Amino acid sequence: MTATAQAPVKLVKIRVNNSRIMDRYETAYITLQSPTGRTIELHKWKLRHADAAAVKVFQKCCGDPMVRFIGDVELTIEEMRIAHRLAHTTNFI
């Protein structure tokens, strides 16, 4: 019986601020700050055109939109790539 060793999933701790999530739909967003200090904004209106993985990452970071949350969340490297792609997507057609 051979066991295949899988590489452990690397988690990144990021700072999330969802204090602007209850604004109007067009202006609502959450901010994600990486350990290196780089900040991206995930706008709520982009979820209308996003795939299911991007929506899942947004919901994981946002948590309960009725509760203001400024704190740390752990994401995988792949989830960070999805969030980055969502933040910089401008072509939805």
Image (cartoon, rainbow, N blue to C red):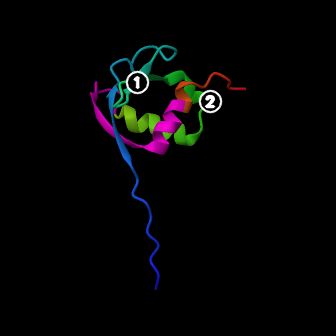
In terms of depth relative to the viewer, which is nearer, 29 or 34?
34
User: Residue 13's mark?
Assistant: none
- What's the amino acid at mark 1? Arg
- The answer to which of 61 and 74 lies nearer the viewer is 74
Residue 38: mark in rendering? 1
In this rendering, position of residue 80 left or right of residue 91: left
Instruction: Kindly give the residue lying farthest to the right in the view shown.
Output: 93
In the rendered structure, which segment of residues is drawn in magenta?
64-84
Query: Tag 1: Cα neighbours inside 10 Å, few (<14), some, or many (≥20)?
Result: few
Q: Residue at x 46, y 14 (%)?
A: 24
- Left of 85 or right of it: where is 24? left
Report the residue at 51% width, 31% height from top.
84
In the depicted structure, whether residue 76 falls above or below residue 93: below
* SS category of the residue bearing label 2: helix
Q: Is residue 62 left or right of residue 93?
A: left
Give the percent coordinates (x, y) of residue 40: 45, 23
Residue at the image position 37 percent from the left and 26 percent from the top: 33
Mark 1: which secondary structure? loop
Write down the residue under mark 2: 49
User: Taking 65 as reference, is 92 left or right?
Assistant: right
Q: Magenta stretch: residue 77 in it? A: yes
Q: Amino acid at mark 2?
A: His
